[in-house]
Image: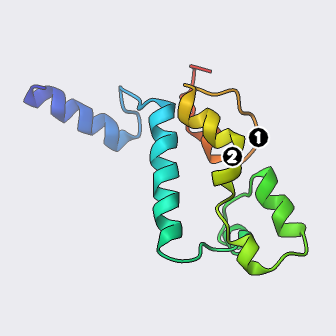
Amino acid sequence: MTRRNEEQFFEQLADGTPETLAPSRLKSRIYSALMQREAQTGPLRTVTETEAQGRALCVFEKTMEVSPVPDSLQALNFCRVCHARLLGEHVENPPIFWPHCPYVAFKNPGKA
């Protein structure tokens, strides 16, 4: 990559409009790996705490939030057992349409 191309790439990245997009499968795998690593360091935030921090919950997290379960169950990584994760990691622009699912957010615009 020439110096001019590098400068242009970083300018576009800073503008929030990069010319090239990472594949949605790669973004999904990175997210899954980061979540798994985070869970190894200790308990995750509960879904109630997560929502209080301003992040919307997916349908499965919302179900756990309203269920009478202890905080230890609310702090599980629900993506590990969700089929949306498998689709996200193995299918480019997967057919997932649930609101607030991180794997939906990774789909590249205009490619679905």
Q: Quadrant where the C terminus lies? A: top right
Q: Which residue is mark 2?
A: 101
- Vertical placement of residue 55 versus 30, above or below: below
In which quadrant of the rendered view does residue 103 lie?
Answer: top right
Colouring rule applied to residues: rainbow
Residue in front for this viewpoint, 109 or 7: 109
Whether the residues at callouts 2 and 1 have beta carbons within 8 Å, the answer is yes
- Position in image of residue 46 (x %, y %): 69, 73
Residue 27's place in the image compared with 2, above or below, is below
Which one is in front, 107 or 25?
25
Mark 1: amino acid = Trp
- In percent of width and height, residue 52 lies at 71, 73
Mark 1, residue position:
98
Quadrant housing residue 63: bottom right
Crowd band around label 1 with a 10 angstrom C-alpha radius: few (<14), some (14–19), many (20+): some
* Viewer can see residue 48: no
* 97 horizontally vs 103: left or right: right
Q: Residue furthest left?
A: 3
Q: Residue drawn 59% across and 76% down? A: 43
Q: Amino acid at mark 2?
A: Cys
Badge 2 marks a residue whose secondary structure is: loop
Residue 17: image x %, image y %? 41, 34
Q: Estimate the x, y position of residue 11 in percent, counting from the top left.
A: 26, 37
Residue depicted at x 52% and y 50%: 32
* Residue drawn 63% across the image and 28% down it: 94
